[in-house]
Amino acid sequence: MNDGLLSQEEIDALLNGGFTQKETISETDKDLLGEIGNISMGSASTALSTIINRMVNITTPRVSITSLREMKKEFDVPIISVEVEYIEGLIGANLLLIKITDAIVIADLMMGGDGTRKADTLSEIEISAVSEAMNQMIGSSATSLSQMLNMPINISPPYASVWDEKNNKLSEKISEDDDIVKISFRLTIDALVDSEIMLLLPIQTAKMIINKLTGTEENTVEEQKQIFDNEANVENYFIDTNTNAQQVEYTPHEYNKPQYNVQKAEFAPLTPIATNEVKNIDLILDVPLEISVVLGRTKKTIKDILELSVGSLVELDKLTEEPVEILVNGKKVALGEVVVIDENFGVRITSIVSNAERVKSLQGK
């Protein structure tokens, strides 16, 4: 430093006791969050598929640590966001982002089109339609997460908005400079969309999910909320003592910085990894999955649907002797034939989809 003046980063480091307040999570936790996100967004894809009557895949999670301010530099605006706040079971918020070009395809399909409408913007009714679809997706995701954690999870009514200016706030609940977990997924809708959808979580919320799933949670929800509040007060103290910093007002729900418990590092002796060590997948072996059987599909216009009545026949695109598709969370895993067990329908598996076919289905090929 040539001018003898302290930089803002150095001032912040001195105020924070010489430590940079940068939160992180381990690679193992990232892998676990990816598995959790894959299952919960699988439920979201099933919800969206039901709404638009098209095959939807949300796969290939990629987990990283970033902030809303950093993400703003990468975004191509406009985008549509839906935000909810956890009001039971967890603390924090959940933000789902989708590109406007993908939203246009979804809106067109919901309005009875074929998904090929060319446009740069959405009308108010189309925004409402896409927002409702995203509400259903985030609701299904929360339900799936509740089943995984084996606990009730309730969320606030979703708040949808179109973010079209980079100087606007992207979230009402998450500070732009807070560390967040970004889980990016590949989104495909038939051959119409091959894009990306993002799920954002405050890093403390992500850690609560991991701790509850692994059984290592140390604080109750109320204790964790108190930690959030205390950290917000500490952040206010640092801002007030820095005369060059801009004064910031905090709302009760803006939980800013994660907790820091600084202590001398202690390292255990290095030992070989046991061959029978529990893997990450073992943590979610008892998670319930939705299995469905597809007898066939067809396309109808809104006019045709309105003309349906008792006794109407709907012809499907599958012959009677053809095997039916067996889906797990909306992904085809096997083929089978319909059977009758006593007085109930069942399905006998006749073949398992190969790994190559699964990869092709994920790639939309």
Image: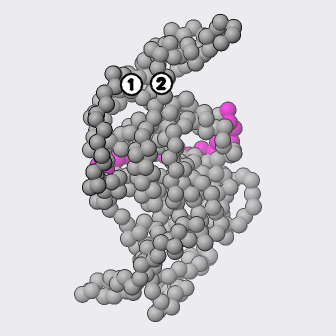
**Which badge, 2 or 1, comes first in the chain's sequence?**
2
Q: Residues within 10 Å of mark 2 (few under 14, many from 20)?
A: some
Which residue has dot 1 on it? 260
Cβ atoms under marks 2 and 1 closer than 8 Å = yes
Residue with the most extreme left position: 342
Q: Secondary structure under badge 1? A: loop
Amino acid of disc 2: Gln
In the figure, is residue 80 to the left or right of 359?
Answer: right
Question: What is the total number of numbered labels drawn onto the structure image?
Answer: 2
Determine if the magenta segment contains residue 166. Answer: yes
Q: Is residue 125 above or below residue 208?
A: below
| Quarter where residue 333 is shown | bottom left
The disc placed on residue 21 is: 2
Q: Residues within 10 Å of mark 1 (few under 14, many from 20)?
A: few
What x and y, as percent, mark residue 225?
35, 30
Q: Is residue 32 above or below residue 313?
A: above
Q: Is residue 355 above or below residue 164?
A: below
Q: Which residue sits at x=45%, y=14%? A: 17
The C terminus - image quarter = bottom right
Considering depth in this image, is 161 or 22 the residue closer to the camera?
22
Q: Secondary structure under badge 2? A: loop
Which region shows up in magenta?
A: 149-167
